[in-house]
Amino acid sequence: MEDKELFSALVAKLSRDFSIEGSNLPAATDLSVIREFLINRIKELMSRDFERFLNSLYRIDVSESKVQEVLHSKDKITIAEKFADLIIERQLLRLKTQKMYKQGKL
């Protein structure tokens, strides 16, 4: 899966997981732009409906220990950034696993 295709699939997953209109995501070919957009969405969700945000993390299957580690970190300013990185990391891993499964490598 090339980067453009990978980013497109990542945007689709993020759109479903966080109720984001795909057309609202800018430049789906740049991971840093996707990350910044996700950080803003995470901040919004955490302030409006924290329980829903935690449920989204559970659905995505982000490691509970990593979630607890971020929530209990001393640096509260970077919480959204850390969550964005965990979410992107998990979703990319899922996409790569799906690709390998489709190719019969698993």
Image (tube, rainbow, N blue to C red):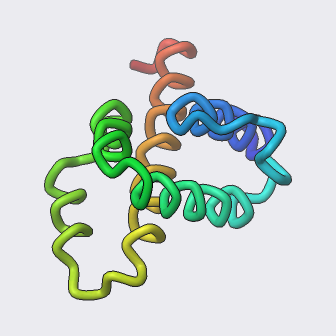
Q: Is residue 13 above or below residue 88?
A: above
Location of the C terminus (image quadrant): top left
What x and y, as percent, mark residue 77?
A: 40, 83
Residue 96 location (% of width, % of height): 52, 34
Question: Where 25 falls versus 47 (above or below)?
Answer: above
Residue 18 location (% of width, % of height): 53, 38
8, 46: nearer the viewer:
46
Residue at 40% in and 57% down: 46
Considering every residue shown, the one lying at the far front of the view is 48
Quadrant position of residue 31: bottom right
Would you say 39 lies left or right of 53 here?
right
Q: Residue at x 37, y 35 (%)?
A: 60
Q: What quarter of the picture does the N terminus occupy?
A: top right
Position of residue 58 relative to residue 35, above or below, is above
Q: Nearer the viewer, residue 51 or 57?
A: 51
Residue at left offset 22%, top offset 59%: 66
Q: Give how far across and how far down residue 82 sits, in percent.
A: 40, 69
Q: Is residue 26 left or right of residue 71?
A: right
Nearer the observer, 104 or 62:
62
